[in-house]
Image (cartoon, helix red, strand yellow):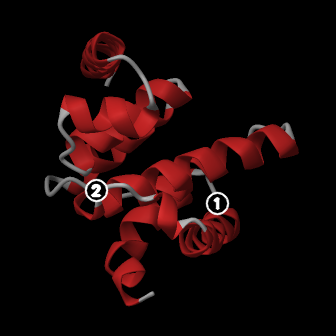
Amino acid sequence: MKIFQMYEADIYRMAFVYMKNEQDALDIVQETAYKAFDKIETLKEPAYFKTWLVKIAISSSLNRLKQLQRIIPMQVDQLVELPTIKTDAALSLLLKQLINELTTEEKGIVLLKFYEDYTFKEIADTLQMPLGSVKSTLYRAHKKLRYQMEEVDFYG
C-alpha cells in the first residue's frame, strides 16, 4: 500500500502520543496498516483516507491501552520525538510537557487541530464525537494550557 506510506509518519506521531513509547507506536502503525488493508472496502470516501487511517490508529491505540491496563509515564527524553511546532526549542519542549498533562481526549483533539490542521468537523468525524463536544473540549484544553503556561511564567 504505497498510499499508506504517505501518511505513515502522521500515524506514528498519533500512535506515539497515545502509547508513549516507540515500540508500541510502531506496533500501532503496523496494526493500522493491516486493518486498513483488510477493511479498505469500508472506506466510503477516498478523499478522507488520511482521516480514516488516523481514526484506525487512535482506535487501535485506545484498545491496546485498555488491554495493557497501564499508564506509561513519559520521560523527558521521549518528548523530543513528538511533533514539534517550529519555535524556540525550550518553548517547544515546554509545550510538549504541558500537552502531555491533558486528558487523552483533550490531547487527541489538540494534536489533530494544531499539529495536523484538521477542521472541527474532521475531528468530530474522526473521533466520532459531536461537533459541540469537540469545540468545548478544545476550549477546555486551551484554557488548561493557558493556565499551566501562566503558572510556569510565574514560577519559571
Residue 53 x %, y %? 44, 60
Whether residue 67 sits left or right of residue 104 in the image: it is right
Identify the mark at residue 48; answer none if there is no mark: 2
Give the CA separation, mark 2 to mark 1.
27 Å
Confirm whether residue 95 shows in the render: no
- Residue 130 higher or lower than 79, as above or below: above
Quarter of the image with the N terminus in it: bottom left
Single out the mark in the foreground, 2 or 1: 2
Query: Which image quarter: residue 140?
Result: top left
Say which element carries label 2. helix
The residue that mark 1 highlights is 21
Q: Position of residue 145 (x, y in %)?
A: 31, 21
Residue placed farthest to the bottom in the image? 2
Which percent across, then down, holds residue 144?
35, 14
Judged left or right of residue 75, residue 96 is left
How many numbered marks are there? 2
Give the residue drawn at x 42%, y 74%.
8
Q: Residue at the location (85% across, 37% down)?
A: 69
Dot 1 alpha-carbon crowd within 10 angstroms: few under 14, some 14 to 19, many 20 or more = some
Residue 7 relative to residue 89: left or right: right
Image quadrant assignment for residue 139: top left
| Residue at the limit of the structure toward the left, as seen here | 87
- Give amino acid for label 2: Tyr
Q: Which quadrant would residue 153 be assigned to in this image?
A: top left
Q: 150 and 7: which one is in front?
A: 7
